[in-house]
Amino acid sequence: MERRDFIKLSALTAGAAGLAGCGNPDHQLIRFLPEENLIPGVASWRPSLCPLCAAGCGVLARVMEGDAEVVRDGRTGLLKMGLVKKLEGNPAHPVSRGKLCARGQAAVQLAYHPDRIQQPLKRRGERGAGEFEPVDWDEALGTLAAWLKEVLAGDPSGLAWLSRPLRGGRRALVERFLAAAGASPPVYFELLDESVLRRANRLGFGREQLPTYVLGAANYLLSLNADFLGTWNSPVAQAIGFGEFRQGQPGRRGKFVQVETRVSQTGANADEWIPIRPGTEGALALALAHVLLNEKLRPAAAAGSAGAHIEGWSQGLPEWTPEKAETLTGIAADRIRRLARELVAHGPAVVIAGGAALAQTNGLATALAVNALNALLGSVGASGPVRFTPQWESTVPALPHRTLRALVQKILSQPDSPVKLLLLYEANPVFATPPAWQVAAALDRVPFLVSFGSFLDETNSRADLVLPDHTFLESWVDDVPESGTEQAVVSLAAPAMRPLHNTRALPDVLLELGRMLGGRVSEALPWGSYEEFLRVRFDALARQVGADPEEFWKRALEQGGWWSENGLVHTAAPQPARATSRLVRYQVAETDGAVEEFPFHFLPYASQAFYDGSTAHLPWLQELPDVLTTVMWGSWVELNPQTAERLGIRQGDMVEVASQHGTLQAPAVLSPGIAPDAVAMPIGQGHRTFTRYASGRGANPIAVLAPLEEPETGALAWAATRVRVRRVGAGRLVLFSGGLSRFPHAEER
Amino acid sequence: MKKTASRINGDLLRPVLETSPRFYRAVALVGAVAALGFVAWGYQVWNGIGVAGIRRPVFWGFYITNFVFWIGISHAGTLISAILRLANAGWRRPVTRCAEAITVFALMIGAMFPLIHLGRPWLAFWLFPIPNERGLWPNFRSPLLWDFFAINTYLLGSLLFLLLPMLPDFALVRDRARGWRRRIYGWLALGWEGTPRQWHRLETAMHIMAILIIPVAVSVHSIVSFDFAMAPVPMWHSTIFAPYFVVGAIFSGIAALILAMALLRKLLHLEEYLQPKHFDNLGKLLLVMSLLWFYFVFAERLTVWYGNDPAEMAVFRATQSGAYAPLFWAMVFCNFLLPMPLLAIQRLRTITGTVIASLAVVVGMWLERFLIIVPSLAHKYLPYSWGTYAPTWVEITITVATFAGMVLLYMLFAKLVPVISVWEFKVGSHRHAMAADARLQTETEPEPAVGEVSA
Amino acid sequence: MPKNAEEESVTVNHRWGMVADLDRCTGCEACVVACRAENNIPTVGEAEAARGRAMHWIRIERYWEGEFPNARLRYLPVLCQQCDAAPCEPVCPTYASHHTADGLNAQVYNRCIGTRYCANACPYTVRFFNFFHPVWEKPLHLQLNPDVSVREVGVMEKCTFCVQRIKAASLQARAEGRELRDGEVKPACVQACPSEALVFGDLNDPDSRVARLARSPRGSKLLEEVGTQPKITYLARLSWSDDEENR
Ligand SMILES: Nc1nc2c(c(=O)[nH]1)N[C@H]1C(S)=C(S)[C@@H](COP(=O)(O)OP(=O)(O)OC[C@H]3O[C@@H](n4cnc5c(=O)[nH]c(N)nc54)[C@H](O)[C@@H]3O)O[C@H]1N2
Ligand SMILES: Nc1nc2c(c(=O)[nH]1)N[C@H]1C(S)=C(S)[C@@H](COP(=O)(O)OP(=O)(O)OC[C@H]3O[C@@H](n4cnc5c(=O)[nH]c(N)nc54)[C@H](O)[C@@H]3O)O[C@H]1N2
Ligand code: SF4
Ligand code: SF4
Ligand code: SF4
Ligand code: SF4
Ligand code: SF4
């Protein structure tokens, strides 16, 4: 497609002589025809979408002219093209509203990463040895097409798809492709999956979807373990709301109470911080409801369908006295009563549960209790702070953890795997699943693995064939955000810049494959390009909105998508609340490992810089000091100082964390913000292979997790493992703050 | 025993006129160590200043320590000899030249460090007020600029002060040497004939220089102290710094002088010229300076402790009881506790005694410079950005090399000119001179010194 | 100097300042990465970072108070305070650190010879030094912002209040023959800050958002006692109990 802009300088020899003078060996003799209408030194702003988490923030890319070394038709040369220099939030976009988080700010490094896969690769060495040789696209596509033909000729369900949860056009296209081919349904995996909360919302509110919290509309905020200002749900939208919550409303400043086991980046902002035993958040929510009901502060009926699923709700939760909750949560009964009264007195109030609170075997019960509490407080719906983003189409992935485990079992069920050909895309389950899930073993049993990834991580490096995708800045991108706004949003953006390397956009590769396969598949995918496909989708949307498709498309491309002006229009029909009015009984959360042998509750947490580990390869984020510990370029284990003293552990000592399922080693950080009977560790480091910046750095907490799950959704209970800790020797922390974490005389502040 | 003029000439000029192979071996050895310093510096320039141990927030380390230290050492010579000249202390005569030489060499070495420590030494010339086509001048408000002027003035002054009284001795060597030596010394002697007019002018010039050089010397180390006192860094920003630094400078300078004299005495067999009484007198001076130094340290620390400013207390604690305490108390031991008895008790104030004390003081004063610079930078106002500092092999090599460099320069100096001013010494031992100088009693015969020289 | 006069005529009537609302700052560090991206701040790598050479023109300092379960954490965004009486300026022998007409503490990389005196003199320790020649492993260099010069070994650098953005906006305004609008200039950190803890603008314009916020009773300056006359006002973080009187 870049064929037309390929020329060659005539005076090769002269050029050679001159350039040789510069003594710059990798300087090229070829100069491709420059991109048109670029004014040197003048920036143009092009919309795009941040790909680094499910929030789907809209971004504006600052594009300026520059000289890039590119490969076109197998020739390397200099191309004067628009290069993305900086990402900002897209002010028009309802989710990001002109802002981005730290990861979003660093996303530009995806495109320019020195270890990006620059052309198709074919495995050379052993599986997983990570030895590849370059192949051209025709050969790569040919190989894949041949495999597809063979598999589809036999049992088509031998074709499987494993990627991060997709939304919008990519999801539609992938699923069309798989359906037409008769393949097994796609598996969408991400570690920090929110199925539990979605399911609870479906049971409680009839919406299988993540909630949107309009914090600006709240005056009281009770968060149970949710890192809503850092990594959870839609952090940017929530941080914007938090600013309004705190200082945005004249004459009003909301109260923020955080209940968690370790002071998190979010918890540090709380006006009142309350420690709680992990997995007992639901008990707290029920006790709060108990007080509201028994003190007649709210009628039980106010909770509506959300309360209907909770045993004893209509009777006022007789058994859930604050005293009982105290024995479970460790929070004093009086304090619970006070909190309950404040919720009513200082409303509008909102209760948020997330992260470790729901990553428990009793996560669903907890989420239901919190939903009921919110409903009881009248916080749900147009009036309250808890709302749901109207969606043009549903984006819920089918129970990621359960479907991945099913796929693994299917592969391992027979000596020769019934899954013959597995397509991998932007998911790294080898890194992000507990060892007991046996994902690596399963992948190694699949005869042919094809990856569309851009980096050789633990999963992609096992592939037999790699067909690298463009980065988001080089491709057509679109999205349907699940939360973070009250407007219906369908994001859309054209490529912000031309491809740097010899890569191809996944959707276009699928369309190409369809053509090569012919038959059902090509009929199902009649579009020449992904752009064409998106255009068709937007025409449909335009008709639904009653707009002129041409204008609609142009406008969407200019502003970065389409969003409904006035809130709740054009939404997909909400799924009805589950017919079964089955009562969910609150169970005490299971943990893995006996307290005597494994005295510490192990709390992995999504790290500000690396989220679930998928951004650990970006040097800006590696060198970003963790805001609580100031650690750079590594991982650590957080311990309470008293605990550390008891175990003879000093700051920076190397400690071993051992569960029933594995051990890891990392340097210790003593933090006064963590409970004495818990140890915490950020997720993200400990990659065996993930580019020069992340490989062999730090330790991976997921590697010691027990395979406990929440029964209804099969979601991994990643905060339910118990561990023991011991000092193994001297360690090394790279800290940005070489100084104290306190003022020598606090009173000076 | 009798010292005839001819014997004096013989003793004092021997080192200049004949050289033993031992000397060459020694020069080669010391020279090699000094050369290592240049290798290390080259390595640093080539790879970047990052090969040194400095880091945020301790942006100054060994290099600036050495800078302050050597400029301090330089205060021995010229200042002391000037004071003694004006005080007309006769016992000074064999001492002044070795002293003045120390000044010149210490200044030359000290002045290298501001260049060594630059991030872009190749642009060092921007520090200097050189007229340029861009009409760009350095910032005269910066103490670094004041350093530039102060040090250069002091260096020039000291050079003159050193060279002027050498003329008669150059003439002396000229008259004894032959061949190329004769030509060179003839040129150095600037046609000295020893006519009364020349003698008169020399004396006047020396007197004027002696008066001028004292305020310059005092200003130099005051200004060096301003490098620190002018910055709002805890325990730098102090009015006491200027006198504190000057005292410390003279203190370390005298110690260095005593060491130099002891070495010359041994190596050049000048036992009869550099006598115990010289060491005794310098020892007394050292004692006074030690007391003064301790007084300043005490006054500085007390006010900080009493003022109890949180930022300053952080530095105070770090030095008094924290990470830097061992160095601090070592410094107090070297500069005060050890010298006190050695210098205060008459019986111990021997050559050995003063030499031991001086060794301690030189070490102690180096530590003092380090302790003034590093702990303060490591504990500025915001505890989040506190830090530490440890030197790398580059800094250590360069530091060691400068000491070797000092020895080397001194050896060569002693080889090329009489380290004891021959004519002054004779004037001192002349009866007329005796009358003029009641302090010194020698049992030598009167001799027409001047005539002897010009013969 | 006619050249300077011409330059300064663009912004001479401005006095740029910032407000950091500690009641809004969530410690998300979006500002920290945004500044890197905008200002070509080099990544020094693990080994150098371990030697205290990592560069972050803006940082979020955190200070603990109390012990579990009453441990509290406070965030403090610290960047160059653009002091009116900047200790880093008089000490610089080459004028590399100097004051501009619109009150910025400018850093002329080209003039800096690396004495590091300014960094010692800065009470806030916000000046960063290039101990080695910075490297951008290809093709990361393609991201470099052409509006910001890349520094070389031996050169001091620090927050510039994104002077390139100030200049660009001023020139734009002048081209359109109008005054700068309040909020038209947004440094990268301010633009990124999701909770709008950071606000930037012209302190000479009494009605500008930054000027109004700077007059807040919650306002104070960092290390005011040192006498640097910083141009960043910190708005105190409130505790819920006493919020009544602070409305
Ligand atoms: N390789 C290469 N060569 C080029 C060019 C190129 O792009 N690449 N561009 C060409 C063009 S367009 C130009 S204009 C010329 C520019 O060539 P030069 O005029 O050499 O420009 P610089 O190298 O930027 O600056 C020259 C020197 O001035 C020093 N300097 C900076 N500030 C001051 C100061 O205040 N006083 C003094 N005395 N020196 C100072 C710098 O450190 C540098 O060493 O280069 C031409 N040559
Ligand atoms: N940071 C920083 N900025 C500077 C300077 C600096 O020293 N540092 N120097 C300033 C100065 S003095 C100058 S002159 C300007 C120079 O600024 P520019 O004019 O931008 O100079 P270059 O970037 O060297 O060249 C511009 C473009 O011309 C392309 N080019 C080369 N040969 C040809 C050709 O034959 N045809 C076409 N169409 N394009 C070609 C190059 O690839 C390059 O992308 O930069 C100014 N800006
Ligand atoms: S929250 Fe951060 S990472 Fe997630 S999409 Fe928005 S900017 Fe990207
Ligand atoms: S904060 Fe530091 S660097 Fe910035 S102006 Fe003030 S003194 Fe200079
Ligand atoms: S480091 Fe550079 S800016 Fe700082 S004082 Fe030295 S020359 Fe000036
Ligand atoms: S103002 Fe600009 S330079 Fe300063 S910290 Fe913010 S982004 Fe960085
Ligand atoms: S971006 Fe804003 S809220 Fe986030 S850390 Fe920086 S100043 Fe604080």
Image (cartoon, rainbow, N blue to C red):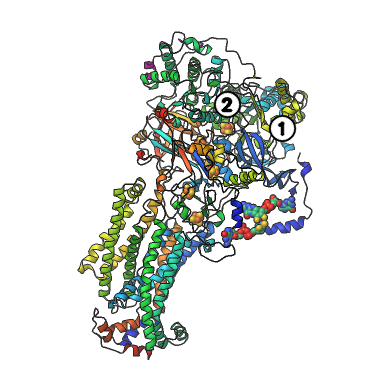
Could you say whether the residue bearing mark 1 is in a helix, strand or loop? helix
Left or right of B85: which side holds A680?
Answer: right
Residue C55 % position (x, y): 51, 46
Q: Main secondary structure of the magenta part?
A: loop
Q: Chain of mark 1?
A: A
Query: Which residue extends farthest top?
Result: A315
Magenta stretch in the rendered image: A308-326
Query: Which residue extends farthest front?
Result: C206
Residue B84 % position (x, y): 31, 74
Q: Amino acid at mark 1?
A: Val
Q: Is residue A316 magenta?
A: yes
Dot 1, crowdedness within 10 Å: few (<14), some or many (≥20)? some
Quadrant of the image for the C terminus of chain B? bottom left
Residue closer to the observer: A50 or C215: C215
Q: Which residue is mark 2?
A: A484
Residue B187 % position (x, y): 46, 84
Residue closer to the observer: B190 or B45: B190
Q: Indicate whether A238 appears above or below B18.
A: above
Q: Indicate whether A498 appears above or below A24.
A: above
Q: Tell which tag, 2 or 1, sits nearer the viewer.
A: 2
Q: Chain of mark 2?
A: A
Left or right of A570: which side holds A298?
Answer: left
Q: How far apart are the two marked residues, 2 and 1, measured between alpha carbons?
A: 32 Å
Instruction: Kindly identify which numbered label has been placed on residue A509.
Output: 1
Q: Amino acid at mark 2?
A: Gly
